[in-house]
Image (tube, grey):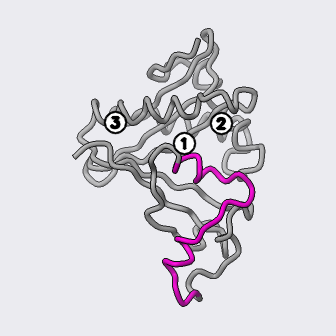
Amino acid sequence: MLTIRDMPRDRASIAQAGKILVAAFAENWSDAWVTLADGVEEVEDNLKEDDTLCRAAFVEDVMVGWIGGLPEYDGNVVELHPLAVHPDYHGQGIGRALVEDFEIQVAQRTDAVTITLGSDDVNNMTTLASVDLFAQDDFFGAIEAIQNLKNHPYTFYQKLGFRIIGVIPDANGFGKHDIMMGKRVKR
């Protein structure tokens, strides 16, 4: 049975969350969190402030995923960062459950109106990859015409009601854009 609760702050739980982050992003996403130390540092960053949200998913008391949230814009926005589900548990609705729970937590526990997230395309997973967006005659048209080529997560978030709200061109190097997404959680 899946349960979601605030991330435990003990060393073993932080280490497990770090392992999940490294495993989840090792598949084909990026080199953001390569070592366990990188993963643990990210978890600790998500837990260090009192106003951050950090939730973990458990299957039979085994942590299988987690999600973090960082307040921005004087608390009006929460950035969803990161979302990680261990690859052994992909396709079981755990990511969806974490995001849905996160939305509820943001709406109930913060003053935020909007959730944002960045979904990098560093591995040529969309039609925006390797495109010089600044050279496009129709910058926004290129973004609007985006196609998913290799299971990029932006479509996962779209299914959950998030919209593409912009792109940060070349955020990770030339043609490696950050696809910005957002969703209003309350008025």
Secondary structure at numbered mark 1: strand
Q: Which residue is mark 1?
A: 82
| Label 2 – label 1 distance at C-alpha | 8 Å
Q: Point out which mark residue 21 bears.
A: 2
- Circle 2 or circle 3, nearest the eye: 3
Q: Is residue 54 magenta?
A: no
Image position, residue 22 (x, y; %): 70, 38
Q: Residue at x 61, y 34 (%)?
A: 40
Q: Is residue 79 above or below residue 180?
A: above
Task: Say what amino acid the circle numbered 2 marks.
Answer: Leu
Q: Is residue 131 above or below residue 149?
A: below
| Label 2 – label 3 distance at C-alpha | 22 Å
- Image quarter of residue 120: bottom right
Image position, residue 155 (x, y; %): 59, 52
Q: Point out which mark residue 106 bears.
A: 3
**Which sits earlier in the primary sequence, circle 2 or circle 1?**
2
> Which region of the structure is painted magenta?
136-158
Q: Residue at x 48, y 37 (%)?
A: 68
Image position, residue 171 (x, y; %): 58, 68
Between residue 158 and residue 170, name the one nearer to us: 158
Please say if the residues under marks 2 and 1 sit with CB atoms less than 8 Å apart.
yes
**Which sits earlier in the primary sequence, circle 2 or circle 3?**
2
